[in-house]
Amino acid sequence: MATHILGISAFYHDSAAALIRDGEIIAAAQEERFTRRKHDPAFPRNAINYCLNEGGINTDELDYVTFYERPLVKFERLLETYLAFAPRGFASFQRAVPLWVNHKLDMPRQIIAGLGGQFRGDLCFTDHHESHAASAFFPSPFEEASILTLDAVGEWGTSSIGVGRGNKISISQEMRFPHSLGMLYSAFTYYTGFKVNSGEYKLMGLAPYGEPRFVDVILEKVASIKEDGSLWLDMSYFNYCQGLTMTSEKFHKLFGGPPRKQEGAITEKDMDLAASVQVVCEHVVLRAARHAHRESGLRNLVMAGGVALNCVANGRLLREGPFENIWIQPAAGDAGGAMGSALLIWYQMLDKVRKINSDDSQRGSLLGPRFSNGDIRLFLDSTGASYEYASDENVLIDRVARLLNEEKVIGWFQGRMEYGPRALGCRSIIGDARSPRMQQKMNLKIKFRESFRPFAPCVLRDFVDTVFEMRPNEDSPYMLLVAPVRDDWRLPLGRDELSKLKDPDLRVRVAVQRSRVPAITHVDYSARVQTVDPDRHGRFYRLMNRFYELTRCPVVVNTSFNIRGEPIVCTPEDAYRCFMATDMDCLILENQILMKDAQPSGVLQDAENYRARYELD
Ligand SMILES: [Fe+2]
């Protein structure tokens, strides 16, 4: 009889579920994709149902259900923090405690109730950072590796260092709340007017516009970094222990004014702050990694935790060493804790033999729902949509490659949905990276955002070192590394372009054509690279190959299939709704081709109404 383990993360942000059968990852998904509520923290009822369905089992066939952190220890941290800061912090104390007493402390009962009362197995709780560490090591392609986890906070831990060998992990060092790299980064995210727990990647994208002129003041006054990469924060600059904001008045005074208002104009100061905290973040990550390397002497590193999504820091770590190989869990944030917790039970607690896959065991992170051509046609017929069915894949990919070459923007919906925050070619919007108009078109007419960020490239893995400063055939299948565009792909800038680079409007700066693939080249020539290979990416690889045959360009733009504030689409219905409410030219649902201009006018959606459903992120 097979052993089934269900991992759950919930009640904070990014709830998710993952199902493991005899150690094999069967299914994993975030709850937000089903409820259409971004970062949904609710009990992941839909994600669990999907995982059980995919595994072909019922709740009573689950041997273990495991939760990604220990609620009692977390509650103890909250209480101790409040006591340490009392009587300050009463407002947030008053807000948090009833929620804990009435809901979160009763988690075992809530989980059992959420499973519908048929669960007969064991309920387990694993440590937050151990769950991250397990999600990083066990699916990795390494027999042994150093482990580094970095996030805002779990129970007490804010980062950890350890080692994974065979079927065991051990954590040797932990940094504790309130000293936290994730919290420091989020404090600057808050201060520069972005949303905490979701706007961090915008801050990272803003950094290349700025000068890191605040690094010294941050390191002198706000944070000190020790040789081993541990961090000490002067808490008088922060307010997250005792208040409802991230930063204190003293922080605002130090950096010359109150936090930027959300959606307000971005100033040079904001860009410089972004550049500065990014440099500090990279210092910490590099030092922690060097320390981990000194301690273990191993060649491989695995990483997880929200900070491991900082792909600029990851890119530097890979280029500057000391590790030869790095593997990062694609669901590095708390959603990935669900999978980590389940793997921890299988290997660490049940002591099962670990089979190592030379690619990795994450299966491209394509672990979510899929839909057959039959399902899709049933839905399309019920809405009266107009479509063609291309039974021959060669016909399909030739048609799409030609549409890309004509600068059409294409919704590309294929196979299983991605687990983790990035669309990796299954729920993606794709376009021609060579087009100087593509960045603006996708931002304004498809995503409904006025972004200063370029889009991310997908590149055929065989060409990764042709276009980017990366090693031949280097894998980056999860879009977690930033690398520079190679010199011979860059374009010389004339006087006109150089003056545009000083424009106060960042959209003017990002629109300057810096390379032969301008839609994916940032102002500092960097790009967040996803490599596409035949084993993981199948049809998407074959599409890109056909595009390459037509154009000699091995790169396309890849952005997530959603509008601003919307979770990435999950079902054909979600995809069709998004397609009809935006200026996307074409939608490919498995083998069905839908052209926008062929759709009946009755089903066209009002973009304004569609946009209004989603909170700005
Ligand atoms: Fe975490």
Image: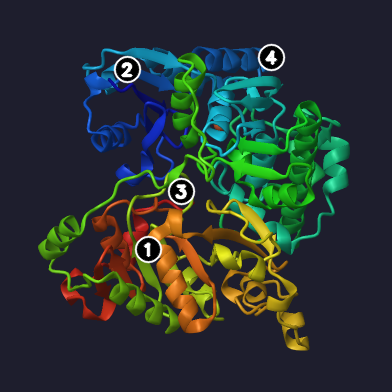
Does residue 121 lie above or below 131 as drawn? above
Q: Disc 4 marks which amino acid?
A: Ala
Question: Element under label 3?
Answer: helix
Look at discs 4 and 3 and give the one toward the viewer: 3
**Marks 4 and 3, how far apart in space?**
45 Å
Q: Disc 3 marks which amino acid?
A: Gly
Label 3: which residue?
364
Q: Earlier in the sequence, mark 2 or mark 3?
A: 2
Q: Residues within 10 Å of mark 2 (few under 14, many from 20)?
A: some
Label 1: which residue?
539
Which residue is at 59% across, 42% downward? Answer: 328
Q: Disc 2 marks which amino acid?
A: Asp
Label 2: which residue?
63
- Pointer 2 with pointer 3, Cβ within 8 A: no
Count numbered badges in the picture.
4
Q: Quadrant of residue 174?
A: top right
Question: Element under label 1?
Answer: helix
Which residue is at 66% across, 15% downward? Answer: 86
**Location of ligand 1 given as a quarter of the image:** top right
- Residue 284 is left or right of residue 99, and the answer is right
Question: Element under label 4?
Answer: helix
* Residue sitting nearer the eye, 301 or 418: 301
- Pointer 1 with pointer 4, Cβ within 8 A: no
Which residue is at 49% across, 77% downward? Answer: 548
Does residue 236 lie above or below 319 as drawn? above
Label 4: which residue?
84
Residue 318, percent across and down? 72, 49
Question: Element under label 2?
Answer: loop
Look at discs 1 and 4 and give the one toward the viewer: 1
Residue 353, percent across and down? 48, 23
**Marks 1 and 4, how far apart in space?**
56 Å
Q: Quadrant of residue 596?
A: bottom left
